[in-house]
């Protein structure tokens, strides 16, 4: 018969004492030292989201169809021959330039692409150049390491799935490395002349500010613009809106006083021409 054994009774565990808080010893202060100024929390720069979230920065209503027509006609006159400011010579180099332009200015991309496209004008040459070779040529733009990886990978994917050609559908473009909806829309608009409205930071801001097509998300603004802009203006409107946002309807402070489309615009806080201070007279 097996002997019954009793589990040894556990000694009641003593609750562990919490560690005593460390005492901070104040630095010796000179008796005549001035009192320290009160510490301020660092001020954050206003973000784009904060700007567009401000109710004053958003049109109180959507534009009516006649207002849309007038607004876009005014922009068309202000920006005749509007085109992308990225330099490219083929659908492939356009695609690469647009991928590189994410969170970078067109000017900074245009500074690196001449050397990059001279070394690798085709997907096969880009794959041969390799990630390190691409990285060495685009190091001055933001996110260069990740972009170098994507540029080589998307070139390899184009060779594998599309005979080295840039595909002409949104689905195929978005399946390429580093290509999102906005990049696909730009390529479809510029290289394939399709009526797409890529929504970047400028287009998002303008659509909400002016009442052209208000929305809380990029997708909502894109859908509103596609629905509201007349079909024959939709392709060019992409360039008009970007140039207008880049040079006149700026993020921090729009320059409404010199805006060609001020009349139909519904922005409720239009800006006046800045007054110049008279020069100080010297005796
Ligand atoms: S610059 Fe001013 S008037 Fe012109 S579109 Fe922008 S908010 Fe409207």
Image (tube, rainbow, N blue to C red):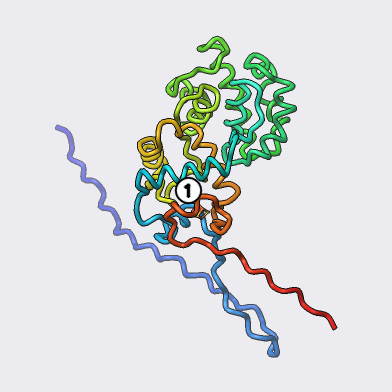
Quadrant containing the N terminus is top left
Residue at the spot x=68%, y=19% of the render? Answer: 121
Q: Is residue 153 above or below residue 140?
A: above
Residue at the spot x=69%, y=72% of the render? Answer: 277
Q: Is residue 154 above or below residue 249?
A: above
Of the pair 140 and 272, the residue shown nearer to us: 272
Residue at the spot x=59%, y=76% of the render? Answer: 25
Mark 1 neighbour density, 10 Å: few (under 14) some (14–19) many (20 or more): many
Please state if 33 lies on the left or on the right of 41 as rendered. Answer: right
Please state if 202 lies on the left or on the right of 218 as rendered. Answer: right
Of the pair 198 and 19, the residue shown nearer to us: 198
Quadrant containing the C terminus is bottom right
Q: In terms of secondary structure, where does tag 1 sit?
A: helix
Of the pair 23 and 159, the residue shown nearer to us: 159
Regarding residue 219, the answer to whether it shows in the image is no
Whole-percent x, y for residue 7 in the image = 24, 46
The quadrant in which residue 252 appears is: bottom right
Q: Is residue 260 above or below residue 126?
A: below
Please state if 124 lies on the left or on the right of 222 as rendered. Answer: right
Whole-percent x, y for residue 241 in the image = 51, 42
Report whether the residue tagged 1 is closer than 8 Å to ligand 1.
yes
Which residue, given by chain and number where applicable, does mark 1 sit on?
Answer: 206
Regarding residue 160, the answer to whether it shows in the image is yes
């Amino acid at each position: 018969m097996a002997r019954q054994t009793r589990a040894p009774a556990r000694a009641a565990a003593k609750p562990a004492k919490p560690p005593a808080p460390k005492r901070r010893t104040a630095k010796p202060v000179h008796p005549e030292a001035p009192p320290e100024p009160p510490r301020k929390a660092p001020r954050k720069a206003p973000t784009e989201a904060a700007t567009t979230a401000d109710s004053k920065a958003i049109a109180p209503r959507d534009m009516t169809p006649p207002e849309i027509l007038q607004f876009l006609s005014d922009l068309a006159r202000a920006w005749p021959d509007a085109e992308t400011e990225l330099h490219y010579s083929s659908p492939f180099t356009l695609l690469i330039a647009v991928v590189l332009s994410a969170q970078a200015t067109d000017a900074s991309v245009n500074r690196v692409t001449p050397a990059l496209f001279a070394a690798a004008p085709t997907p096969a040459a880009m794959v041969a150049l390799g990630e390190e070779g691409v990285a060495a040529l685009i190091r001055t733009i933001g996110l260069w390491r990740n972009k170098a990886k994507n540029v080589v990978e998307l070139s390899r994917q184009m060779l594998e799935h599309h005979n080295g050609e840039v595909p002409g559908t949104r689905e195929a473009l978005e399946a390429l490395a580093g290509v999102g909806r906005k990049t696909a829309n730009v390529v479809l608009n510029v290289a394939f002349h399709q009526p797409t409205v890529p929504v970047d930071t400028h287009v998002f801001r303008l659509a909400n500010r002016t009442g052209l097509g208000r929305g809380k998300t990029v997708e909502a603004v894109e859908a509103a613009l596609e629905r509201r802009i007349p079909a024959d203006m939709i392709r060019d409107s992409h360039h008009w809106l970007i140039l207008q946002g880049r040079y006149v309807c700026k993020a921090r402070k729009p320059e409404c006083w010199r805006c060609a489309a001020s009349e139909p615009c519904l922005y409720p806080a239009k800006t006046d021409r800045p007054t110049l201070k008279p020069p100080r007279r010297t005796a």
